[in-house]
Amino acid sequence: MRAFGSDTRLPTVAMVLDLLRERTQVSRIELAQATGLTRATMTNAVRKLIDLGFVHEVGTARSQRGTPRRLLELQPDACHMVGLQFDRFRGVAVIVDLAGGIVARRELPVLGERGPDEVVPELAAAVCEMIGASALAREAIRGIGIATYGPQDRDAGVLLTPQPTPEWQGYPLASAVAEATGLPVAIENDATAAGIGAQHLGAAPSNFAVVYMSGGIGGGLIIDGHPYRGATSNGLELGHISVDPAGAACGCGNRGCLDNVASPVAVAHLASRTPLAARLGLGTDPLEAFGLVGRAAADGDAEAAELIDASVLNLTAAAVTLVNLLDVGSVVLAGSAFTEFGDRYRDAVQDALDRSVFMRHVHSVNVELAGDLAHAAAVGAAMVVLRNLLEEPGLGDRPAPKR
Ligand SMILES: [Zn+2]
């Protein structure tokens, strides 16, 4: 097992790379000042990035003392990663460059109620098609990051849940996709990946909690720009916070879980047992049904509004608990379920935090939607591949390529 909290150390090279993404052109001295690293450490980190081809020197600028400083610039095209996000109801794939920019995207087949023998070859084929349709050489792709649900053994790349079929329990997802595509694969909790993605898709702050909603609800935490993963990457399970200790039993073993009263799957299930099912023509896809109920609520349907209001109320209660526990400065909402009605949830969470969070007289807590709600987790998963690459021992010790 990974040592508790060891992942919160941001490796030097990754930290320098993050700064280079933020600033167009920057000198080593400016980087050292911004990071607090010694000039020697900075010089070493920059040399590694130049050796990898990730950074180029692009000229000089005069310092205040008049001495010339070489300027550095990120080369976004030097490295590309694939990111996938998939669950039972939605799946997307992206190719991301070194700067976190999306250069290709497509939808993926969803899990539904199917087992890995059927699904994994489809995922692999979709990834290979996406790479083939892009202008990139296959060698330009450094790996695949997969954002998906838990519980999971992130280090081993294995899913630890019998959902949606028993064959997924203990299934070696990372090695199976690696074998099918010929690329290295890492897996990541989808809410954590959404937090990493949000950093690259907008002006996400360096400390924030994530509320992630696809079919179900999850949570994530970014501390000083780096994901918090707890002991086994299975923390921040917001969907399994009990909002009603006397409520219905949940498959997780707890009672009255948020997931069972606020998630799109829960809203769709509750709606299917009311006259809304016939009135709105609800089908079997819970995210589609959630969308229909949400639109009806926005159009003034009282029965639909009651379901959405209950979802919003329960989610805001969990968000207040989350902030009371963590004392974060911001909450970022991400996930495809927020695409259409994100503003309604954001406004309600903001209002609840303003009114009732414990530390509100000390500081306000800002609630915002991630830059690309439906793709944030896939982008984050792709960036996990890059972080893994940068954490490899001996990175950049190889000779610089001849130019
Ligand atoms: Zn539960």
Image (cartoon, helix red, strand yellow):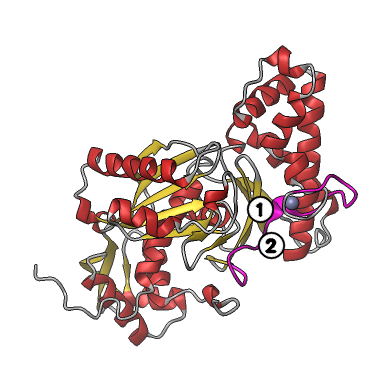
Closest to the observer: 98 or 94? 94
| Span shown in magenta | 228-250
Neighbour class for label 1 at 10 Å: few (<14), some, many (≥20)?
many
Q: In the displayed structure, does residue 351 sit left or right of residue 39?
A: right
Rendering quarter of residue 39: bottom left
Residue type, numbered disc 2: Val
Q: Is disc 1's CB within 8 Å of ligand 1?
A: no
The residue depicted at 23 percent of the width and 41 percent of the height is 132
Quarter containing the N terminus? bottom right
The residue indicated by pointer 2 is 328
Disc number at residue 331?
Answer: 1
Q: Is residue 137 above or below residue 110?
A: below
Q: Residue 12, how many percent across, how many down?
A: 41, 77
| Residue depicted at 85% across the width and 52% down the height | 356
Cβ–Cβ below 8 Å for labels 2 and 1? yes
Q: CA distance from mark 2 to mark 1?
A: 7 Å
